[in-house]
Image: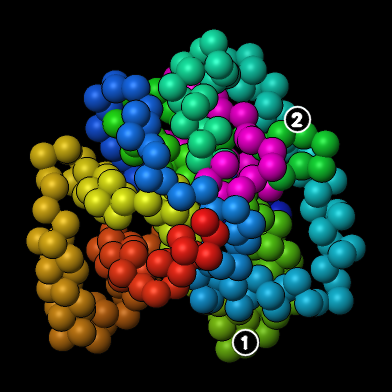
Amino acid sequence: MKQDENNPILSPILSFHTYFDYIIFIHIGRNFYRDNQTKVPLRGISASQFRHPLDKELTNFVESAPFQPLLEQAIRSSFSLVEQSVRLDLLGSSVKVSGNQLPELYEGMNEAARILDMAIVPELYIQSSSQANAYTLALQGKNTTALVVITSALLERCTNEEIQAIIGHELGHLKCSHSLYLTLGGLASIPLRILPVIGSLSENFLQEWRLSAEYSCDRAALLVAQDVNVVTGAMLKLFAGTDRVTNSAAFIEQSREYKKLLDNANPLVRRRVMRRVRTHPLPVERVVELEEWAKSKEYKSILESCK
């Protein structure tokens, strides 16, 4: 299953992560959260508190647009049909997690939702697949419960703590209503695409917005895990395809090497790399971004203010 990146309506609806897009972890199979007393429930936290700056700026712009209420209603109506179809497919072919079915995952989802102060806990499904993925319909329906899906391959590769961080990332998309706002942004940019220069700039803005939305959700994963080593270590396992790679500092040094080489590369090579369309930021960029945010006053103030 892949996103339709050319469809401004459907492309952001599925928050979809492949081996090279998302955090994959190694499964040990222990019980969840025996030592969870130190985790801070973030009472009253809003999405604006952890959004990446560009994600926040463009979301605020779309929220203030005069067309926003009418288009939001139309998007939600269309979304309900997509949601109904996906829910039926999951109920018919996947395993729904509950207190009686994979209770450790059920506990992990409930705790993650409590940490991010989400009133309605999404349904969690395990889908049989040889590819390690996680995704959500990143928009909360008015009369339905949101959906989060983790594939069996991902589950087998993850520790329980890391699975909860994955859930946190997906809850970040829901908390931020990324499907709604990215779709609104895509619709607003349609008239601009036929214009020279401006059309290209609008496409670049949307691309940067999608990437910054992933940074926002990496932050949500950290807020749930409340341990940067869980998240960055998991990223390393994803990017290397093995759990034997564990040195985050060495990977950050690799990111500096990448930047230096890119800065000194032939202009044609550099342009090709910079113009490559991506659904997610580069691995080295995600690790550095998350490490920096984990050390920031912003992150620490969230933990303090929401106690």
| Disc 1 residue crowd, few under 14, some 14–19, many 20+, Cα 10 Å | few
Q: Is residue 287 left or right of residue 111?
A: left
Residue, x 77% and y 42% (percent of image)? Answer: 141
Image coords of residue 273 (percent x, y): 30, 72
- The stretch of residues the image draws in magenta is 114-139
- The 10 Å Cα crowd at callout 2, few under 14, some 14 to 19, many 20 or more, is few
Q: Which amino acid does label 2 sit on?
A: Gln
Q: Would you place residue 97 above or below residue 39 in this image? A: above
Q: Looking at the picture, does residue 283 appear above or below residue 115?
A: below
Which of the two residues, 249 or 226, is positioned nearer the viewer here? 226
In the rendered view, does 81 fall on the left or right side of 212? right
Which residue corresponds to mark 1? 198
Q: Is residue 278 visible?
A: no
Q: For the residue labelled by badge 2, is the local secondary structure a helix, a strand or a loop? A: helix
Which element is circle 1 on? helix
The front one of 7 and 47 is: 47
Asked if residue 305 lies in the magenta stretch, the reply is: no
The percent position of residue 104, horizontal first and vertical second, equals 43, 22
Q: Which of marks 2 and 1 is nearer the N terminus?
A: 2
**Which x, y percent locates residue 98?**
57, 18
The residue identified by callout 2 is 84
Residue beneath the point at 73% across and 73% down: 62
Which of these two is toward me, 174 or 188? 174
Marks 2 & 1, CB-CB < 8 Å contact:
no
Q: Which residue is drawn at 62% across and 87% down?
A: 198
